[in-house]
Image (cartoon, rainbow, N blue to C red):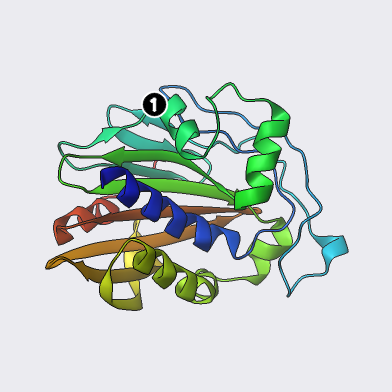
């Protein structure tokens, strides 16, 4: 059940990230204590209707990183976020994150990474869980600078809402409700998707926030049977 919840949260995050997927770069899992790098390699896929395919750019910003985990805190200098998880939560290592993405390990080849990105549109780069069926996931996708310039957080979340409901239904939840509201995240106002659903008399809560920057979309999702787990996003601050 725990793995199913993790996969569902990851799928929710990836569904949001994939809405604006254009040309892609290869993104590796966040590492424990050391920032990950990337190798740029664009694909031909472009699902962004608002932008002309020929003008979509992939960000090759040398400052891009998929983040790192330090003392049970997820940090990402590129998105300038620092997110400590709840007490009792533990982050998975790079190998487990790669396995969750359907990859063999964190030393996969460029071609394997490209195949994963082409299939999913984005990758989970970090996740943490506890013994109470709660989870926190981070997914990042490359959409191209045109996409992130044209689209807003709200448009991306709204466009992916039906897919997110399907993810909840696939998890066996009923009485699903969603809302999109502004919230304070890293000291700024951002759009937040809140979702609830019921299974066997237990209510499952989830919140999702996405950040857009220089051709990349970072999606931060948290969920569990206790609404308190959603406070993880409330505790996020700027790294610098």
Q: Mark 1, residues whose alpha carbon is within 10 Å: few (<14), some, or many (≥20)?
A: some
Residue 162 shows up from this direction = yes
Write down the quadrant of residue 207 in the picture.
bottom left
Residue 55, image x and y in percent? 84, 62
Residue 175, image x and y in percent? 25, 78
Residue under the point 35% across and 31% down = 92
Vertical placement of residue 136 versus 45, above or below: above
Residue under the point 33% across and 78% down = 179
Residue under the point 51% across and 61% down = 15
Front-lying residue, 182 or 139: 139
The single residue placed furthest to the right in the displayed view is: 54
Dot 1: element = loop
The single residue placed furthest to the left in the displayed view is: 201
Residue 238 shows up from this direction = no
Front-lying residue, 196 or 82: 196
Residue 52, image x and y in percent? 83, 69
Quarter of the image with the C terminus is top left
Q: Is residue 3 left or right of residue 33?
A: left
Residue assigned mark 1: 93
Vertical placement of residue 126 versus 4, above or below: above
């Amino acid at each position: 059940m725990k793995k199913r919840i993790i996969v569902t949260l990851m799928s929710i995050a990836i569904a949001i990230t994939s809405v604006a997927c254009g040309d892609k770069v290869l993104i590796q899992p966040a590492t424990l204590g050391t920032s990950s790098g990337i190798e740029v390699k664009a694909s031909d896929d472009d699902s962004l209707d608002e932008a002309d395919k020929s003008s979509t750019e992939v960000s090759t910003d040398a400052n891009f990183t998929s983040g790192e985990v330090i003392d049970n805190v997820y940090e990402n200098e590129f998105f300038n976020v620092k997110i400590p998880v709840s007490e009792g939560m533990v982050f998975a290592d790079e190998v487990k994150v790669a396995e969750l993405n359907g990859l063999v390990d964190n030393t996969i080849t460029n071609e394997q990474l490209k195949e994963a990105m082409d299939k999913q549109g984005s990758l989970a780069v970090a996740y943490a869980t506890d013994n109470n069926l709660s989870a926190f996931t981070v997914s990042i996708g490359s959409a191209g600078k045109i996409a992130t310039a044209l689209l807003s957080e709200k448009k991306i979340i709204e466009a992916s809402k039906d897919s997110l409901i399907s993810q909840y239904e696939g998890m066996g939840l009923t009485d699903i409700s969603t809302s999109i509201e502004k919230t304070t995240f890293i000291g700024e106002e951002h759009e937040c998707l809140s979702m609830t659903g019921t299974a066997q008399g237990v209510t499952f809560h989830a919140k999702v926030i996405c950040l857009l920057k220089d051709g990349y979309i970072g999606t931060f999702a948290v969920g569990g049977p206790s609404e308190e787990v959603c406070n993880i996003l409330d505790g996020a601050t700027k790294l610098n």
